[in-house]
Image (tube, rainbow, N blue to C red):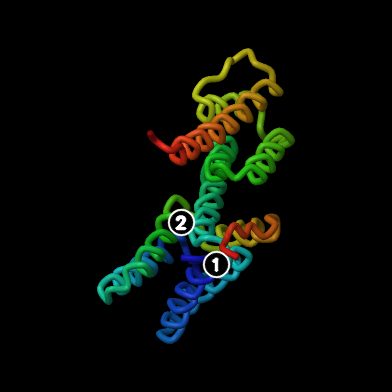
Amino acid sequence: MAALKVAQLRITLDAFAALYSHAGATEQAEAVRAVSHALARADKLSVDEIIQALEKSATKSPSQSSGEH
Amino acid sequence: MRGHQLREILSDIREAISGSGGTKHAEALDRIQAALADLDHAPASDAIARIDTNAAGLTQPAWEAKLAQLQSAGLNEPEFLRLLDEIANDKNIKKADLLKIAQVYVGYADKKASTDKLISAIKTRFYGKIYDRDADEMAKRATPW
């Protein structure tokens, strides 16, 4: 079975962004679009490759909480 | 929006997809949101920047990926210093690569400069940005009369 490509996952994300937008959930729509956009340059890669990179950077980076307290 | 809210949205999508048989997509979204869990209390933009940086890292030449990381660190000093240290010690980053990084980050870099000088120029540019930000903030706080 062929590996899932980032481009294929992005089609799903874009569809959900459109659904959120249609339902008036603008913030959610924008967030999903931003995730899709961030993935765009890896379109030709398999989803596994980007996930492995993300998992690696998650374990490498200390908690970067710059948030509210 | 915070990181955990972004993860909740991705989880909602995952649930909707898995209900309709999109197992591979659902599993992918599950792993993506899990890999962002340490950014739950950070702004969602940090999580998105992580995705962007990693996508860049996989598709760009090493020097471009490092430059993108430096730029996405913004004015976050510990993160900037960590990345710069990583660049200085990365054997895959040759002097020619460092020169390209410095040329874009600083705006100018001497081709004859040593590696140490290029690193130093990048650092100087970073602290210049911090200075500009602080000066702007002071100017905004100044009482006009």
Give the class, few, some or many, for how many residues have Cα within 10 Å of label 1's Cα (few <14, many ≥20). many
Residue at the image point whose x is 71% and y is 33% from the top: B88
Quadrant of the rendered image containing residue B12: bottom left
In the depicted view, which residue is nearer to us: B126 or A14? B126
Disc 2 + disc 1, Cβ < 8 Å: no
Question: Disc 2 to disc 1, how far (Cα)?
Answer: 11 Å
With respect to residue B120, does B71 lie above or below?
A: below
Going by the numbered disc 2, the residue's amino acid type is: Leu
With respect to residue A7, does B31 lie above or below?
A: below
Mark 2 lies on residue: A39
- Which chain hosts label 2? A
Quadrant of the rendered image containing residue B17: bottom left
Mark 1 lies on residue: B32
Quadrant of the rendered image containing residue B143: top left
Residue at the image point whose x is 50% and y is 28% from the top: B104
Q: Position of residue B16 (x, y in %)?
A: 42, 82
Q: Position of residue A31 (x, y in %)?
A: 41, 64
Side (left or right) of B49 relative to B37? left
Side (left or right) of A27 relative to A5? left
Residue at the image point whose x is 57% and y is 27% from the top: B102
Going by the numbered disc 1, the residue's amino acid type is: Ile
Give the structural element (helix, strand or loop) at label 1.
Answer: helix
